[in-house]
Image (spheres, rainbow, N blue to C red):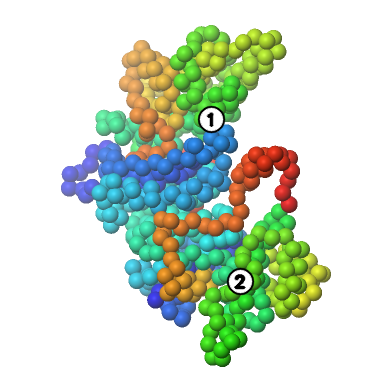
Amino acid sequence: MKRNKTEEDVYILAIESSCDETAAAVVKNGRQVLSNIISSQIDLHTLYGGVVPEIASRKHIERINQVIETALSDAGMTLEQITAVAVTYGPGLVGALLVGVAEAKAIAYAADKPLVGVHHIEGHISANFIEHPDLEPPFICLVVSGGHSHLVMVKNYGEFEILGRTRDDAAGEAFDKVARAVGLGYPGGPKIDKAAREGDKHAIRFPRAKVDGSDYDFSFSGLKSAVLNYLNHAQMTGEEVSVPDLAASFQYAVVDVLVTHTMEAARALGCGKVAIAGGVASNSELRSEMKKACKKAGLTFYYPSPVFCTDNAVMIGTAAYYEYINGVRSGWDLNAVPYLKLGER
Amino acid sequence: MKILGIESSSLTASVAVVTDDVVTAEFTMNFKKTHSQTLLPMLEQLGRMIELDKKTLDAIAVAAGPGSFTGLRIGAATAKGLGLALNKPLAAVPTLEALAYNLWGCGGVVCPILDARRDQVYAGVYRVDGWNREKKGTLAEWVPEPLLEQTAIGMAELLEKLDGIGEPVTFLGDGVPVFREKIEASLGVPFAFAPAPNNRQRASSVAALGLEYVKRGMTVSAADFRPDYLRKSQAEREREEKEAGNAGVTET
């Protein structure tokens, strides 16, 4: 999107608290990162083998002011110099979202700034704009994380068509469950990725699920069951299980489906650009397989650095910038919407 | 001195501005609509009505707990956001102390109770008459004087304590409709229930008491403030029980 030179610069203070990271950032004109603060609670939740919503909410309230203040000071800015305040209002854990939403509303109200509520997935997709100044819609984006698996056609800034979604577990959820089953622990994504590097991805052939009637939808619960059955069978027959082989084979099965569906969508829709986003987008197998497939098909492949794949506020600031210049403003009654759908307000 | 009060610890949503010893404005609702949708719009309307220059506020007083975990956090995040943006300190006023303050001047003792589920109430017992029994014409206490600090407690145990104190009791709070019959059936000392105008949380009480806190330098920075839930999260409780070797034993 071309901006008129005479237009004033837009500085967004963005806040993200939808899960277990308390994050704030200042983003200039949608693509320039002035600060990026993330306070992770992962160590705390590891004790419980997953994110505990009440604990996450309590931690958010303890850290949120420091995180925002640091984001402002790292950017060398005062609140008065900020153009608008942006916040993730869904989807996510309702109690966690509410902390960011209430905080953002109070700051915007007190500082007389406009407020922009941002969809978390729109944020993840927008993470691709941060490091790729040339990237503009339309493009196809695969969003994969612990809570989401979507194949999205990004038609324009703030305009999306969901091509496919998971019918059961999110991709990241499948990683967590399998990691727990083989004793790798939480969080499953990075642990499986690491173990898989020592293994043979062709060692075990796990099923690739097809969803009837939808070319682009995903299903990972069958794959998860296949892994658990394999483990059970091995235990009963006293067969030794190679965790690296199992991790590599499972990971390959997930990645294979993700890449195949994305490539099919790009071909059917005649789209020359493919992007990935979300926590699972930092998975090394997904990155390398998608890169290979895009190269083979003559498509341009975009992916964010790992720091912009996991939850962060820069991506929220980037998404908010395009919403802001499109005239989107949220009211003081902005609420957290845990099951917010992409493209809805 | 000008203090903004915020109360969202349970069903009540309330905002008020207290200027010295006058409630400049108060907006209170006891209505089933989420605080996330009501609190800031109420504040915005109240501010507009009294032409509030936000920069002239001396501090933000907030009901600091106990109460609904989510309700407390909406109030806390609102207060922290205002404190951050306006660069003002917070006064963390205990929910039950502010509730008792609704009845300032009342003889006997005051017992605010909030339904805490799991067969408990959040309760405290306070003397709020302020009379100095030692010296005529002076105030003994500026703050509700606790005979029982706010805590999560079983109703039977609370009633025993009140009989032990042996003074007439006035009850208030959202625990009253839940436990009224139990109180009527088993409390020995004389008792009464506060009427509608002052039987639920009010931001004016939080702000007025908060003003006394500020006068005495009892403030907290917006960054450091966190609610006092009086209870751990369920996951933490269960983990601790498990570690103590009591897995399967449920708390009452």
Q: Residue at x 47, y 48 (%)?
A: A60
Position of residue A278 measured from the top left corner of the image (x, y, whole percent): 43, 31
Q: Amino acid at mark 2?
A: Pro
The extreme left residue here reads A6
Quarter of the image that includes the N terminus of chain B: bottom left
Position of residue A287 measured from the top left corner of the image (x, y, whole percent): 40, 21
Compared to residue A235, the image places residue A341 above or below, namely: below
Q: Residue B32: tell me if it is visible.
A: yes
Query: In the displayed structure, does residue A9 sit left or right of residue A288?
Result: left
Compared to residue A201, the image places residue A106 above or below, namely: below
Q: Count every numbered label the image shows and give the total.
A: 2
Marks 2 and 1: CB-CB under 8 Å?
A: no
> Dot 2 falls on which chain?
B
Query: In the displayed structure, does residue B96 sit left or right of residue A129?
Result: right
Q: Residue at x 56, y 89 (%)?
A: B135
Taking depth in this image into account, of A155 and A235 the one nearest to the observer is: A235
Query: In the displayed structure, does residue A332 sit left or right of residue B110?
Result: left
Taking depth in this image into account, of B224 and B7 the one nearest to the observer is: B224
Quadrant position of residue B111: bottom right
Q: Residue B180: tell me if it is visible.
A: no
Taking depth in this image into account, of B131 and A213 the one nearest to the observer is: B131
Helix, strand or loop under label 1? loop
Q: Amino acid at mark 1?
A: Tyr
Residue A186 numbered mark, or none: 1
The residue indicated by pointer 2 is B146
Compared to residue B196, the image places residue B62 above or below, namely: above
Q: Residue at x 52, y 55 (%)?
A: B73
- Marks 2, 1 in one chain: no
Position of residue A258 measured from the top left corner of the image (x, y, whole percent): 48, 21
Compared to residue B197, the image places residue B222 above or below, namely: above
* Label 2, residues with CA under 10 Å away: few <14, some 14-19, many ≥20: some
Quadrant position of residue A220: top right
